[in-house]
Amino acid sequence: MKYCSQCGAQITVRVPEGDNLPRYVCASCDTVHYRNPRMVVGCIPDWQGRILLCRRAIEPRRGLWTLPAGYLENGETTIEGAIRETREEANARVEVADLYTMINLPHIDQVYLLFRAQLLDERFSPGDESLETGLFSEPDIPWDELAFPTVEFTLRHYFRDLKQGHFRLRVTDITPPYKMK
């Protein structure tokens, strides 16, 4: 950030009075511009024990597989965002069940919220951000081609819980170096 969105003056980085962390502060009007973590929302779309994955058509991690997910937009709920991302990336319709994983990635200022969801039908296809889409059972998951450790964490726990017939909320932090398997 270089310029204040309130008055257009130059921004400096300093600890504002009454705070304890460096913030972007306007040198002219003293407006504090907070940078907060970005929320990534998505679904674990299930169809009879198989999960819908998307092969990424965009960077980062182009060509690798992921769950349909992306940044939460202003003005939408986390569930609305998860449904939207699933529709945008896989042209799929889902009914969201419950929050399944909340994963903190403090090193890149992100928080992932992934919801269990049921596909409403088998009609899906790649959206603009996907090269291809497909349904995968556990042995068919392209484990070595998953785009993000958040996806691996979520899927490994999901299939364990599926076998046990009980899903619980999973909350974790993922920081480098990644060692999931």
Image (cartoon, rainbow, N blue to C red):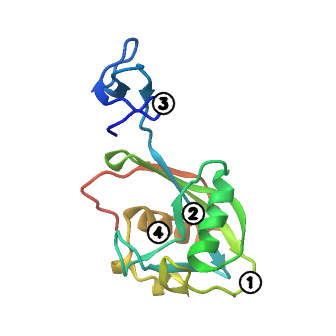
Rendered image quadrant of residue 33 = top left
Type of residue at label 1? Answer: Asp
Q: Residues within 10 Å of mark 3 (few under 14, many from 20)?
A: few
x and y, in percent, of residue 26 in the image: 37, 25
| Residue shown at the point (44%, 39%) measured from the top left | 36
- Asked whether the residues under the numbered discs 4 and 1 touch, taking CB atoms below 8 Å apart as contact, a structural biologist would say no
In the depicted view, which residue is nearer to us: 12 or 10?
10
Image height of 80 relative to 31, above or below = below
Circle nearer the N terminus (1, 2): 2
- Tag 1's secondary structure? loop
Which label sits in the foreground, 4 or 2?
A: 2
Residue at which label 4 appears: 156
At horizontal 69% and vertical 87% (from top left) the residue drawn is: 123
**Secondary structure state at the residue bearing disc 3:** loop
Q: Is residue 19 above or below residue 105?
A: above
- Judging by the rendered image, the residue that carries numbered circle 3 is 6
Residue type at mark 3 is: Gln
* Residue mark closest to the camera, 4 vs 3: 3
Residue at the spot 33% in from the left edge and 22% down from the top edge: 27
The answer to whether any part of residue 44 appears in the image is: no
How far from the left and from the top, in percent, is residue 96?
71, 64
